Amino acid sequence: MKKIWIPIMIIAVPLLIAALIFATMGLWNWLVPVLFAGPVITFWQTAGLLLLSKILFGGFHGKRCGPGNHMRDRWRNRWEEKMKHMSPEQREELRKKWKARCGTGWGYREESSSEAAGSGVSGNV
């Protein structure tokens, strides 16, 4: 059974890669020249573009594995372990400290009422 799959994979994988390259090339050549007055690209330019995007963005993989995810899991486990051994008061104090440091959203920091009153700024930024 294994001997049958090897020739099939030798043929199927390059065909799938070529199909991906042709699909990307078709979309590029259909949209980019019309929308952005960009160039029409060839098969090999498209292959290079896909390879460059793979290198820069690390796409095309289904499983989430790699050094970044292992580090994130280790960091999360370490903080969960620390939080387990804290009292509810200590947890709330830590949350307040991180909220003051990081804010509540993207680029948003809450000012305390005394700071907002003293600076003449009312409301949120």
Image (tube, helix red, strand yellow):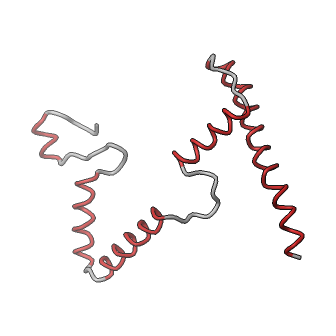
Q: How many marks?
A: 0
In this view, 110 is above or below 64: above
Residue 84 screen position, x and y as percent = 33, 81
**Where is residue 41, by image quadrant?**
top right
Residue 96 screen position, x and y as percent = 24, 62
Q: Quadrant of the N terminus?
A: bottom right
Which residue is at 18% across, 48% downward?
112
In this view, 32 is above or below 11: above
Viewer-closest of 43 and 54:
43
Name of the residue lying farthest toward the bottom = 85
Viewer-closest of 104 and 55:
55
Side (left or right) of 60 relative to 94: right
Side (left or right) of 75 relative to 19: left
Residue 106 screen position, x and y as percent = 37, 45
Which residue is at 26% across, 60% downward?
98
In this view, 41 is above or below 14: above
Viewer-closest of 67 and 93:
67
Which residue is at 12% across, 46% downward?
114
In this view, 101 is above or below 40: below
Side (left or right) of 118 relative to 122: left
**Where is residue 27, by image quadrant?**
top right
Viewer-closest of 73 and 60:
60
Side (left or right) of 29 relative to 80: right
Q: Quadrant of the C terminus?
A: top left
Name of the residue lying farthest toward the left = 118
Residue 105 screen position, x and y as percent = 36, 48
**Where is residue 32, by image quadrant?**
top right
